[in-house]
Image: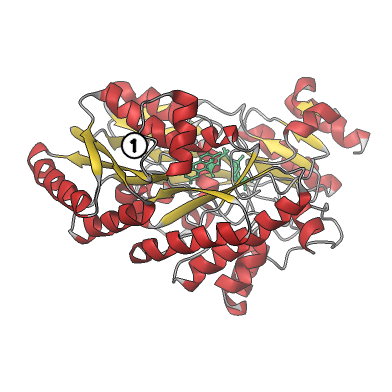
Amino acid sequence: MQSELIAELKYVVGENYVLSSDVDLAVYECDAETLDIARPDLVVLPASTEQVQACVQIANKYNVPFTPRGAGTGLSGGATTVAGGISLVLTRMSGIIEIDKENMVAHVQVGLPNLALSKACEKFGLYFAPDPSSQAASTIGGNLAENSGGPHTLKYGMTCHHVAGVKVVLPDGKITTFGGKAKDNLGLDLLGVFVGSEGTLGVVCEAYVKLSAKPNLVQTMFCYFPDLEQGGQAVSDIVSSGVIPSAMEMVDKLSLNAVEDAFHIGLSREAGAILIVELDGAESSIALQKEIVVACVSRHQGFGITWAKDEKERATIWKARKSAFGALGRIAPHGYVLDGVIPRSKLREAIKRIEAIGKEYNLLISNIYHAGDGNLHPCLLFHRDDLEETKRVIQAGREILDLCLELGGTLSGEHGIGIEKIAEMPDAFSPKDLEAMEWLHHCFNPKSLCNPGKILPSLKLCGESGVRPLLRHQLSC
Ligand SMILES: Cc1cc2nc3c(=O)[nH]c(=O)nc-3n(C[C@H](O)[C@H](O)[C@H](O)COP(=O)(O)OP(=O)(O)OC[C@H]3O[C@@H](n4cnc5c(N)ncnc54)[C@H](O)[C@@H]3O)c2cc1C
């Protein structure tokens, strides 16, 4: 990296916030998708919107790519600097500028972790509804860029349904605001374009997010099934009956055993799957919904049905789900988490065929599902140093994504495309669709300096100039 560039960046953000040693850069070489690794040349940590603007202007002056990054919990390689350059890390920008409880809106800096916002709003009886399982670490900026979901997406929607406005630094360094604190339905919906654009259209610096009132009553149920398929059938029946739980999550035997090994919650190791169902709302309506849920579960051999008696028991139930991915680290050092979506009615078939793919490729696959909205998270366990096994993981992953498309679903429910699923984009979109997206991308990011090599397959792939060789490419190209 040119010394003038480094000096100018240090002048803007301070000496300590431009990192360039090998050890420091190694920390930022990937996100939580560890098949794609590419070290940045520099890591820069600005503290304000104005500092982000100055950094982007400097990157433009020297023609250096820059990739926005939050907490790096992304699961599609979105924050990985595949073309090198600057990893622009927003985590110092974690301030809450205002909580407007009357209008139920918070104005925040985007490096704020998701859960920190809900905790700060607790005293007003409010919370931020999108709740990715990574919410203790993942940032509002990352949630917004990925249009993240979570267990409660089934009833409350994705991040896009809870964002009122964003203040962004565009790829050329201009600052602009889309939407705002109050309802704003004028002109082209550029806020809608920005949310879910995975950091490819600019850097979000501040956000106006909508807060929700905490529900009066929450009832959380936990039960076991002999196998995933029966659990899947119960999930289908619950939704077909007209009950929309706030969350409906499934965890398979492999994951439940890993959780039990790690946390000794007291889970039955004999069961084939766990289902968690959460209902919220008025007491009178919940009573009827509970009856329907229990009837659906019992019809498909559900057993050990337990409703949490208090907040402590509820937290224990959620621990079985939210700590499941982490617990899998006891089985293998690396896990490739997929994010395919299928129509809920195909859950049973998908579960069977994913199991068959695991057998064919001789891989351990754990299954953790946002079952209510058909969002599958098969996690393929492996050791990255075993290149032959890693190759099988990539191939099996592709087959599972193809399966999702074949069953009428899609490539991603919430983790985004990033670098991970870029090769599959032509399977999901026609050339005309992709062309329209490229055109939009070009309008915002004509020099492709902002997060290059993501989402769109036309933007340099394996072996092309500027892109660092990724393990995936070495193994499969
Ligand atoms: C254990 C675990 C559980 C998870 N559970 C869920 C889940 O339930 N639901 C879900 O949706 N996801 C989940 N994820 C994925 C991940 O946590 C989300 O995608 C999250 O929103 C990423 O936030 P982050 O701050 O870590 O972003 P990063 O990983 O740092 O970045 C993600 C993307 O956003 C872009 N970006 C980040 N900040 C900005 C910004 N300020 N402006 C513009 N672009 C930006 C980056 O360039 C990148 O493309 C999980 C991940 C893990 C590891």
Q: Is residue 109 visible?
A: yes
How is this picture coloured?
secondary structure
Reply above or below: 121 against 84: above
Q: Can residue 184 be seen in this view?
A: no
The amino acid type, in three-letter code, at marker 1 is Leu
Is 76 positioned to the left or the right of 86 in the image?
left
**Where residue 144 sits: x, y (%)?**
50, 45
For residue 48, what is the image quadrant? top right
Reply above or below: 235 against 114: below
Which residue is more in the foreground, 257 or 95? Answer: 257
Ligand 1 sits in which quadrant?
Answer: top right
- Residue found at the far right of this picture: 3
Q: Which residue carries the number 1 mark?
A: 211
Reply above or below: 108 against 390: above
- Residue found at the far front of this picture: 270
- Within-10-Å neighbours for mark 1: few <14, some 14–19, many 20+: many
**Where residue 72 sits: x, y (%)?**
62, 37
- Ligand 1 has an atom within 8 Å of the beta carbon of the residue at disc 1: no
Which residue is more in the foreground, 127 or 177? Answer: 127
Is 144 positioned to the left or the right of 467 in the image?
left
**Where residue 107 sits: x, y (%)?**
44, 33
Is 191 positioned to the left or the right of 456 in the image?
left
The residue shown at (54%, 33%) is: 326
Reply above or below: 335 against 242: above
**Where residue 477 sits: x, y (%)?**
80, 64
